[in-house]
Image (cartoon, rainbow, N blue to C red):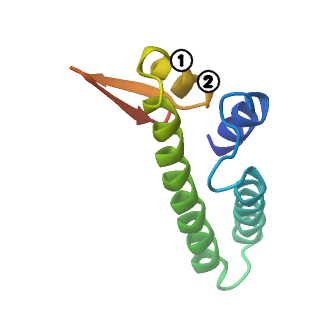
């Protein structure tokens, strides 16, 4: 999921001009999680706790990014659904409200 979001935002810099957190920070957190997951698969002692911490860090960054995407989408209500979808996220529609949900 995170790789797809990073790729979508990278391809859509016209809409998402200054992601917060930065794409570099997201990419680094994803790489850290993948490295930690490799350690778990190699059965390295203590690796599970490290992997879980890296996952938590990435989820925190993704939550921050979700807020940024929502802010960009709210700036233009006519194209908000398209903006959200172009970020690699999905739209959950409630009457009069757009929520962002992972695809």
Please give the name of the residue rendered at 61% of the width and 31% of the height, measured from the top-left corner: 87
Residue lying furthest top in this view? Answer: 78
Image spot of residue 21 (x, y percent) = 64, 56
- Which residue bears the numbered disc 1? 82
Residue lying furthest left in this view? Answer: 95
Please give the name of the residue rendered at 73% of the width and 60% of the height, measured from the top-left corner: 25
Marks 1/2: CA distance? 6 Å
Image spot of residue 89 (x, y percent) = 54, 32
Crowding at label 1, few (<14), some or many (≥20) Cα neighbours within 10 Å?
few
> Cβ–Cβ below 8 Å for labels 1 and 2?
yes
Image spot of residue 37 (x, y percent) = 70, 64
Picture quadrant where residue 43 is located: bottom right
Q: Closest to the observer: 40 or 70?
A: 70
Q: Closest to the observer: 74 or 57?
A: 74
Q: Quarter holding the N terminus?
A: top right
Q: Is residue 48 above or below residue 35?
A: below
Crowding at label 2, few (<14), some or many (≥20) Cα neighbours within 10 Å?
some
Please give the name of the residue rendered at 48% of the width and 53% of the height, measured from the top-left corner: 63
Q: Is residue 1 above or below residue 41?
A: above
Residue lying furthest bottom in this view? Answer: 45
- Which residue bears the numbered disc 2? 86
Q: Is residue 103 left or right of residue 13?
A: left
Q: Which mark is residue 44?
A: none
| Mark 1, secondary structure of its residue | helix
Q: Is residue 74 left or right of residue 54?
A: left
Q: Is residue 3 above or below residue 58?
A: above
| Mark 2, secondary structure of its residue | helix
Q: Closest to the observer: 40 or 60?
A: 60
Q: Is residue 20 left or right of residue 56?
A: right
Q: Closest to the observer: 52 or 72?
A: 72
């Amino acid at each position: 999921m995170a790789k797809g979001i990073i790729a979508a935002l990278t391809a859509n810099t016209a809409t998402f001009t200054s992601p917060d957190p930065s794409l570099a920070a997201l990419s680094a957190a994803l790489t850290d999680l993948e490295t930690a997951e490799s350690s778990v698969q190699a059965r390295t002692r203590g690796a599970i706790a490290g992997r879980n911490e890296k996952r938590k860090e990435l989820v925190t960054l993704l939550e921050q990014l979700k807020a940024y995407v929502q802010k960009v989408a709210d700036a233009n209500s006519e194209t908000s659904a398209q903006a959200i979808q172009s970020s690699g996220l999905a739209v959950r529609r409630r009457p009069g409200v757009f929520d962002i949900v992972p695809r």
